[in-house]
Structure formats: C-alpha cells, structure tokens
Image (cartoon, grey):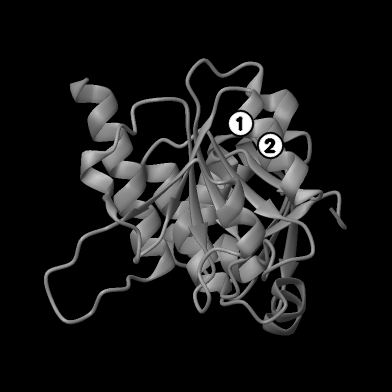
Amino acid sequence: MADAVTTLCGFHAVEVALSKNQVRELYFDRRRVDRRMQTLLDSAKASHLSLKPSDKADLDRLSDGVRHQGIVAISRVAMPRTGFIRFLENIERPLVLVLDALQDPTNLGSCLRNGAAAGADAIVIPRHKGCGLTPAAVRVAAGGASSLAIFEEGNWGPLLEAMKSRGLWLIGLDEHASDDVYQVDLSVALALVVGAEDRGLRQLTRQKCDQLVRIPTCGPVTSLNAATAAGIGLFEAQRQRKCG
C-alpha cells in the first residue's frame, strides 16, 4: 500500500465517509453554493473537520482527473489494507469477493459497489496485478469502498491456500464450467473468485479454486461483465444463506 490515506471524489463517496467519521480533510469548490454542497459542509463543520476552499484546478489535481463534482475528501482510513488472514479470525461464516487482476477501474468500482450492496465481508485484490484501487474505482463504487474491508495482498498462491485452510470454499466463475452457480451450495464460508475482463481467471488462481461454476445465459452472448457476474454470484450466495 503506497499511501496512508485515500482520496474520495464526489458527493456519494464523501457523504458515506462522513457518516462513518472517515474524513480528515475536505476540499470543496468555493464557487459552488447550492443546497447539497451547503448541507455537506454543515455536516463537516459539525464534525470539526478541516475545510479547504478550493478552485477547480486544485480539485482536478487532487482527484487526478476523476470527476469530483466540486468535492474531494482525504480519508482517515487507508485503503486497501493488508492482513486479510488475520481479519478472517473474527468472521464466523465469511462471504468474500476475490478479484483476480481486474484491469478496468470502472469494473473494479462496480464490483466494490456490488460487494457493499450484497453485504460481503471483504474484497481481496492482488498486489501489483490489475488496475489497483484507483480514485476512479473508489468513485464508481459510490460509497461502497468506505463500507467494505478491502485488502491488497501479495504471495497470491499461498494466500489462496491460507484462505482454504481457514475453511473458505473457493468458487471461481468461469463461463465454460460444467456446474451451474444456482445448483451449487454457496451458503458455506465462501470466497467467490472473479477473473479479469479479457482472460478470466489466471492459471494459478484457477488451479487453487475448489470448484468452477458458470452463470447460465439464455441468449447468444455467453460471457458477462466482471462486475455483473460478481453481483449475480454474491446475491445468489446471500439468497441461499437467507433461505437455507
């Protein structure tokens, strides 16, 4: 993890972080005086945060080109974290989303949003593979990044083995698998593994999975967007847990 803090861009992400007391500094467009901005600033003042009146150039620099809507926050919480295996010690029946080197920050952000909406306990991404947790991914997550435990881990093969030794069943999504996701028990301690947009699961990751499953499709298109596939798998897991 290169930085000790995280930059959050846009109203939704900043509002969620404020509600969780995760904001350290708040930069805002001094020329924007509408009600939504004033409500957010009033909330920040009530929390005794450091407010930084800024212009568009300052905000563009802070956001690194990500659309910010005139509001950028510096979070108290570093993302992503390390130490995922220790984190598992406090979770009775984990539901984890493992993202195997996604390349598109938009897809990663959508996966984070889906993970938060589905009540996943954690998201795990590989260090130095894929796009990483960029400001663009955090913004697309629309507050989901602040609601999730996100881990960036190296030593990928040993990490997956350690997850299995802690009782997680690793299920990889693969459009060519013979097993149907709706016919597999997802109510167990689960790590749902989603591969990259172009090549799917890496060979090492595929070999470590306990089972591969497909999401059945009805039309001529047989492959799904990574974020869509992740959302379907996560919500099916939660459905089985509630109905089991």
Q: Residues within 10 Å of mark 1 (few under 14, many from 20)?
A: some
- Compared with 17, 217 (above or below) is below
Nearer to me, 113 or 198:
198
Label 1 sits on what residue type? Answer: Lys
Q: Can you give x and y, in whole percent of width and height, for residue 199 in the image?
A: 53, 75
Residue type beneath disc 2: Glu
The x and y percentages for residue 210 are: 50, 40
Q: Which residue corresponds to the image point at 35% horizontal and 59% vertical from the top-left?
A: 177
Q: Badge 2: few (under 14), some or many (20 or more) residues near its Cα, within 10 Å? A: some
Where 65 sits versus 181, above or below? below
Does residue 81 appear in this view? Answer: no
Q: Is residue 25 above or below residue 86?
A: below
Which residue is rendered at x = 34% and y = 27% of the image? Answer: 187
Quadrant in which residue 217 is drawn? bottom left
| Marks 1 and 2 in Cβ contact (< 8 Å) | yes
Q: Considering the numbered disc 2 on the image, is that residue within a helix, a strand or a loop?
A: helix
Q: Residue at x 68, y 67 (%)?
A: 134
Spatial CA span between label 1 and label 2: 5 Å
* Element carrying mark 1: helix
What percent of the width, then of the height, locates residue 17? 59, 44
Q: Is residue 61 left or right of residue 108?
A: right
Q: Where residue 115 sits: x, y (%)?
A: 44, 46
Camera-nearest residue between 58 and 240: 240
Residue at (74, 50) in percent of width and height: 156
What residue would you read off at disc 1?
A: 164
Quickly name the residue at label 2. 161
Left or right position of 146 against 159: left
For residue 65, what is the image quadrant?
bottom right
Residue 63: mark in rendering = none
Residue 158: in sight, yes or no? yes
Number of numbered discs present? 2
